[in-house]
Amino acid sequence: MTATARAGSVAARSTDPARTGSGDAIRTEGRTKRFRSGQVAVDRIDLVVPRGSVYGFLGPNGSGKTTTIRMLLGLITPTAGSHSMLGEPMPRAAADVLPRVGALVEGPAFHPHLSGRRNLARLDAADRTSDPRTATTRIGTALERVGLTAAAGKRYRAYSLGMRQRLGIAAALLQPRDLLVLDEPTNGLDPQGTREVRGLVESLAHGGTTVLLSSHLLSEVDQVCTHVGVMHVGRLVSQGTIEDLRTAAVPRVHVRTSRPDDAAAVLRRLGVPAPTVHSGEVVADLGPFEPEALLRELVLADVPVREFRVDTADLEDVFVALTGEGFDVSG
Amino acid sequence: MSAVEAVAPVRATSRPRRVVSTRFLRSELRLVFGRLRNLAVLAVLAGVPILIAVAVRLSSPDSGEGPAFLSSITDNGLFVSLAAMTVVLPLFLPLAVAVVSGDAVAGEANLGTLRYLLTVPVRRSRLLAVKYTAVVAFCFAATLVVGLVGAAIGLALFPAGPVTLLSGTTVGSAEASWRILLCALYIGACMAALGAVGMFVSTLTEYPVAAMASTAVLAVTSQVLDALPQLSAIHPYLLSHWWLAYGDLLRDPMSSTGPLHGLGSAAAYIAVFGALAWARFAGRDVSS
C-alpha cells in the first residue's frame, strides 16, 4: 500500500460520523496479569486502540501480547486494572460486545474430524446472536473471503498450516464485526498468503472495522497499520500512530571516508555524541545538527568524504531501541 | 481470497439481539453422536446382549451359574436386556460414560476450540449446561442401546412367554417390557450422576485422557468401597451404591424404595458435582 493510499483511507475513516465521539475500540487502564507462578506476564498496560484504526500490536515472542489479548477477550481473569471494548466495560458486557468482535487467538483450533465448513457451522450455532437462516450464506462467504471454498468439505485434519490459519480467519469473519482481534494471523502462511491476509485486513479496515493485529514481524505491521503499540517483557513501551513512531526515530549520519578517525574527531569536536567507526564508515546520531553544517566542517577539516548520508532510522531500529534486543528473541 | 474486493464488508451497527435456540445443543449432540470413537463405544455396548443371547442359545439349558436373569432368558427373550444391563453396569457402562463426560470440557480445552467457543461468546454456564445435556443424552442412549438391542435379539432367538418376576409372580410380556424400560431409565439416571462427576473432573485438566481415566477409576473405586462391609457406614453415600436397586422394579408389587433412594442419590451427585464444575470453570483461566 502506498503512503498516499494509506493517508486517503485514514482521512476517509476519520470522517465517519458513526465513529466520532463513540470512544475507542479498546482502552485498557493498568491491566495486569500475574500468573499463579508469580510471573507477571502483563504489567500495567494502558492500551488505546482508536476506532477505525489498524493497530499493530508488536513485540517479541513471549512479551505478553497473547496474554493481553486473552484478557481483552475475557479468557483469563486480569489481576488488576480495567478495560473497555467498543465503549462497554469488559468483561461485564462480554455477551453484548463479543458478538461484534472477531478473534483469532494464538493460532487456529478446530475439531480435526470435522470439515472446515462443519467447524464454522458449529461456531455459528454456538452464537446466540446469529441468524440460522443466513448461516449457510455467511459461512460460504467467509470461506470464500479466505480462499477456502474448494477445501471447505475436507476434514480439518487434512488441512495444511496455512489452510488452518485461513479457516481461523474465516471464523472471525462469520459476522459483520466492529472489531477484529487477530493474533499472529500470518503465522504459517506463505508469502502469497501473507499478502492476501494483508489485503484482507486493508479491505476490512476500509469497511470501517477496527483491527488489532498482533505480530512479532515488523514487516507485517509496517505496511498495513495506522497505529502501533510495542510490548517488551510485559510492558507497553511505546504507543502511537505509525508516523509518531517514525519521527521518534533518531536520524543518523553516515560518513564514508579513507580517514574515518579524523572524521570522527571532527564530529566529536562539533559536539555530535559518540560517533562510532567501523570498516571505514563513521556513524553517529544526527541529534540537533544540520547535516549541511557537518559536511562543511568535514570538508574544511580536509577529510576526504567519499559518501555522506543521513538516514531516517527505519522502524526496525526503533523497535530494537525500544525492546533492547533483536526482534525475534523472546523477552 | 480473490474475492476480497467483491464482498463489501458490512459493519455491525447495533447491539446484537440474543435469541433462545437449540442450535448449539443440536451441534453438541451431533458432535458427541457423530464421533467415531463414541459410536464404537456404543457398538461395543450393543455387542454385549448379542454375545449373551448367542451364547445362551448355543449352550445347553443347564450350563450352571451366570449373571442374574440369565436362566430366565430361555423362558422370555426380554430377559436378555436385563442380563446385558447387569453385565455392563459395573464396568462397560461407566467406562463409556467416563469417555464422553471426561472429554466434555477437557477435550475442547485440549484442541483449543474452547477459547473459540468462549469468544463467540458462549457463557461458561451455558457451555457447561449444553455439554452436560449431551453427556446425559449419551448416558441414556448407551443404556437404551443395551436394553433395546437385548430385547430385539432376545425376541429373535427366544420365545416371549410369561415372565416370572423376582418375587415369584408371573406377568405377561407387555408388563415385563415396560418394567425393563423403567430399569433402563433408572440405570441411565445413575449414569447421568457419574457423568456429572466426569464433567467436573473434565474441568480440572486439559488432558481428556486423564479426565476419562480418573472418572473410570472413581466409578470402580466406589464399587470396591461398596463391597467392603467394614465401610458400611458410608455405603449409602457412595456413587454406585444404589445402581443395582433397579432389581426392586422387577418385584411384585413393585418396590420403589431402593430406586427412589437411588434417584435421590443421583440428583444429589448431579447437584454437587454440577456446582463444583461450575465453580471451577466459571473463573478458570483458559490459556490452552
Image (cartoon, coloured by chain):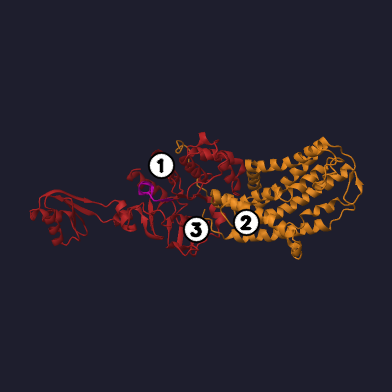
Percent x, y for residue A223? 36, 46
SS class, disc 3: helix
Rounded to the nearest whole Å, what is the CA distance between mark 1 and mark 3? 27 Å
Asked if residue B218 is positioned above or below residue B63 in the image, the reply reads below
Left or right for A311, reference B211: left
The residue carrying pointer 2 sits among few (fewer than 14), some (14 to 19) or many (20 or more) residues within 10 Å by Cα, namely many
Q: Are marks 1 and 2 on the same chain?
A: no
- Tag 2 secondary structure: helix
From the image, tell me which residue sits under label 3.
Answer: A71
- Disc 1, disc 3: CB below 8 Å? no
Which callout, 2 or 3, points to the residue nearer the camera?
Answer: 2
x and y percent of residue B112 in the render?
53, 49
Find the distance from the CA under tag 2 to the CA under tag 3: 25 Å
User: Looking at numbered disc 3 in the image, what kind of residue is underneath it?
Assistant: Met
Q: Quadrant of the N terminus of chain B?
A: top left
Is the residue marked by circle 3 packed among few (<14), some (14-19), or many (20+) residues within 10 Å? Answer: many
Report the residue marked by disc 1: A194
**Chain ID, mark 2:** B
Q: Amino acid at mark 1?
A: Thr
Chain A, chosen colour in render: red
Disc number lying in front (1 or 2): 2
Tell which residue pokes out farthest to the right in this image. Answer: B169
Residue B45, visible in the rendered structure? yes
- Residue at which label 2 appears: B201
Question: Whole-percent x and y of residue A92?
Answer: 55, 60
